[in-house]
Amino acid sequence: MPNIISTKQFKKSEVEKLLALSALMEKACLLESKKGGKKNKIKACLEDKIIACIFFEPSTRTRLSFETAALKLGAKVISAENAGISSSAYKGETIEDTTRMLCSYADAVVMRHPRAGTAEAAAKVATKPIINAGDGANQHPSQGLLDLYTIKKKHKRLDNLTITFVGDLLNSRTLHSLVPLLNMYKNNKFNFISPKELKLDSAFTNDLKNKKIKFVESENLDEVLGSTDALYMTRVQKERFARAKDYEKVKDSFILKVQHLKKMKKDAIIMHPLPRVNEIEIGVDADPRAAYFRQAENGLWVRMALLCYALGI
Ligand code: NCD
């Protein structure tokens, strides 16, 4: 069954197919939204299907874009937000039992949970495809793919790029999903900029070393701005800190300001999975390189493609 648990599960050929299908979805939706535009057949793709969305962590973009994607493809949606208190999980039901139930109602289950490994645990008992919409600090595959789609749309290639990640790298599931995808392509280099408390886990960097991937870890953003093709800002993940004072100490470590922009390449792209808290000054939004809202929009096409993939359509 085509569960979508981690970006590491994909072969490069599958990723390429998903990117192409996402582009097709974008084109079809844009054509349809034009006044007098021809009605196309996307509404028939998931006709009669039901998609369950169950979120144990807050979400704006991921949940609502998955639901929109399902509706645009003609499916119906059942949804539980705040599932930690609104579902029977609150009474102590296990994720396995909840999953069994959802699979008896819906044709696919989109799930977000604060605990790493939950989507995989759900997939073990599921009789329908499970789509991981974020499991703790581990993985967020649909975000990784929409990030890849965004980079490709801008640079028209996915190789020979320098990508700079900034902020809470330790807890960023979006980074954990995007880097393995970028590693499918040749000659990409990474700068990992973070306070030392939020550096990438050594297991992650050791894996990069073993694969002979070029990367630099540092606390100096200014130094790498001029060579960066994609600047990927991240939010410090407050919800992953055990003590408020540890969060307070690092929360504003890196803020992208208007004054930084002049150091950046003309054709660079500024990304952020959103929500933004303090990491990017509002003034940056007016710069044409600021791509984060376009990036979030791309999520719709990619999630349409992923729903089709999971349902074998
Ligand atoms: C991200 C997430 O949930 O991991 N948000 C998202 O899905 N676009 C990033 C974040 O919450 O900081």
Image (cartoon, rainbow, N blue to C red):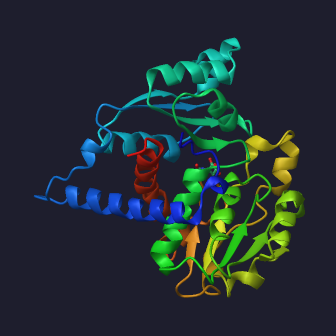
Residue shown at the point (77%, 70%) measured from the top left: 192
Q: Is residue 56 above or below residue 257?
A: above
Q: Quadrant of residue 166?
A: bottom right
**Rendered image quadrant of residue 205:** bottom right
Residue drawn at point x = 43 percent, y = 41 percent: 311
Q: Name the outermost residue toward the left.
A: 36
Q: Quadrant of residue 191?
A: bottom right
Picture coordinates of residue 25 (x, y %)? 34, 57
Q: Residue furthest top?
A: 91
Examine the rendering and report whether any part of residue 291 can be seen. no
Q: Nearer the viewer, residue 298 or 198?
A: 298
Q: Is residue 270 above or below residue 67?
A: below
**Which residue is found at the position 60% from the left and 42% from the top?**
132
Say left or right for 175 vs 68: right
Relative to 272, does residue 152 appear above or below in the rendering? below
Which sits in the foreground, 147 or 184?
Answer: 184
Question: Residue 230 at x, y = what percent?
Answer: 61, 75
Image location (x, y in percent) of residue 180: 68, 63
From the viewer's perspective, tell me whether residue 171 is left or right of residue 64.
Answer: right
Q: Assign the N terminus to one quadrant of the image.
A: top right
How many marks overall? 0
| Residue 8, position as x, y percentages in the image | 67, 56
